[in-house]
Image (spheres, helix red, strand yellow):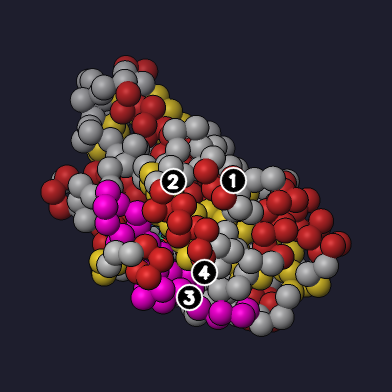
């Protein structure tokens, strides 16, 4: 709901009862709200609303769909999203609310939009302290929220820094003063009998090891995602993907974009249109689910119509290019 930018900065409101109510109301309508957390200011959207989540990527100008952290108001909400082992429960009990993010298997009935997890079958969950938690409780749904800065800039720890970076692209900025921790959350993946640090952050690993009674393995940043086979995506097609298709060949399914048609579309074994109107945010919200849908039709390949690379198109094309790449090269 922020595009095109109006060049009018969003209102900055104090973190009081009115601020919480306004934030929850805007989020319920699919808006973007910059919220203070103890780590840094976050750019929040309803994690169950694909178009709202797409708007996060659009506002940040992120060139790819990396998975986002889901923020919850407590362990009960967290359990509706991720599968907790006893070890995960112990860590949540010790460090929540606080700057510890747990990467867990995605719960089968989780209503999280696939754009939040980038189609992975794991989900990153954290319970923040203070006003962000109050907003989540008022909304009654988890919030997807990366840091509230343009892609490639440093994370904002004040409302003013958010306004300078994203003021024209959000609906509201809630001001609770400087962030207490000022550093991102520590991200730990809960494996079978193992804890893997995906990102060091606000909770020292030694404190996690003390509670867990076991060592935390150090992985390179994002290794949990990058390493082939470690995390299988529900949405990675088994079929070859043919990008910038000008026609549909025998046996192929068609992933269309926009109002136009291409040769052979009528003989596609399955067709899905990311956005008949050619709206990149709608396309982003549909991307993972439609790839899975076409894959389920067992085509010989998925032909993808050209998608313009401006705005969110860049991230959409990045994701499609990865799907099209040879399996052992990703
Ligand atoms: P941020 O930009 O602070 O929201 O960072 C989110 C971080 O969490 C990224 O480094 C992601 O790689 C990581 N992350 C989020 N979801 C997952 C997931 N399902 N599996 C592994 N890492 C994740
Ligand atoms: Mg960031």
Report helix, strand or loop for mark 4: loop
Give the camera-side residue of 158 and 103. Answer: 103
Q: Earlier in the sequence, mark 3 or mark 2?
A: 2
Q: Which mark is residue 99?
A: 4
Look at 46% across and 74% down and name the residue there. Answer: 203
The answer to whether 96 appears left or right of 197 in the picture is: right
Q: Which residues are magenta?
A: 179-208
Q: Are marks 3 and 4 in contact (CB under 8 Å)?
A: yes
Q: Is residue 81 left or right of residue 26?
A: left
As measured in the structure, the alpha-carbon distance from the residue carrying label 3 to the one carrying label 2 is 22 Å
Classify mark 3: helix, strand or loop. loop
Circle 3 packing at 10 Å, graded few (<14), some (14-19), many (20+), is some
On the question of residue 145 being in view, the answer is: no
Q: CA distance from mark 2 to mark 1?
A: 12 Å
Q: Identify the mark at residue 84; answer none if there is no mark.
A: 2
Q: Can residue 84 be seen by looking at this rendering?
A: yes
Q: Cα distance, mark 4 to mark 2?
A: 18 Å
Closest to the observer: 327 or 17? Answer: 17
Q: Is residue 96 above or below residue 292?
A: below
Residue where numbered disc 3 is placed? 202
């Amino acid at each position: 709901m922020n595009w095109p930018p109006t060049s009018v900065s969003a209102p900055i409101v104090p973190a009081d009862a009115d601020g919480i109510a306004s934030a929850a109301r805007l989020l319920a309508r699919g808006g973007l709200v910059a919220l203070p957390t103890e780590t840094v200011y976050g750019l929040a959207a309803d994690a169950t609303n694909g178009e709202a989540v797409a708007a996060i990527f659009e506002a940040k100008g992120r060139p790819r769909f990396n998975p986002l952290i889901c923020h919850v108001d407590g362990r009960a909400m967290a359990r509706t999203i991720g599968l907790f082992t006893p070890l995960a429960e112990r860590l949540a009990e010790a460090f929540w609310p606080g700057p510890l993010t747990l990467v867990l298997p995605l719960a089968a009935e989780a209503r999280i939009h696939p754009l939040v997890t980038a189609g992975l079958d794991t989900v990153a969950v954290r319970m923040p302290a203070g006003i962000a938690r109050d907003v989540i409780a008022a909304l009654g749904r988890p919030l997807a929220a990366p840091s509230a800065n343009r892609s490639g800039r440093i994370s904002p720890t004040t409302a003013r820094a958010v306004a300078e970076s994203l003021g024209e692209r959000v609906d509201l900025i809630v001001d609770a003063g400087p962030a207490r921790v000022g550093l991102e959350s520590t991200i730990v993946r809960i494996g079978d009998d193992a804890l893997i640090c995906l990102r060091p952050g606000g909770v020292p690993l030694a404190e996690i090891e003390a509670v867990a009674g076991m060592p935390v393995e150090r992985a390179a940043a994002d290794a949990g995602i990058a390493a082939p086979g470690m995390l299988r995506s529900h949405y990675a097609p088994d079929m070859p993907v043919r990008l910038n298709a000008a026609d549909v060949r025998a046996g192929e399914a068609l992933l269309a974009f926009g109002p136009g048609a291409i040769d052979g579309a009528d003989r596609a074994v399955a067709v899905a249109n990311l956005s008949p109107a050619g709206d990149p945010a709608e396309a982003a919200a549909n991307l993972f689910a439609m790839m899975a849908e076409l894959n389920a039709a067992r085509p010989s390949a998925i032909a993808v119509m050209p998608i313009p690379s401006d705005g969110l198109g860049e991230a959409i094309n990045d994701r499609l290019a990865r799907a099209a790449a040879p399996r052992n090269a990703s």
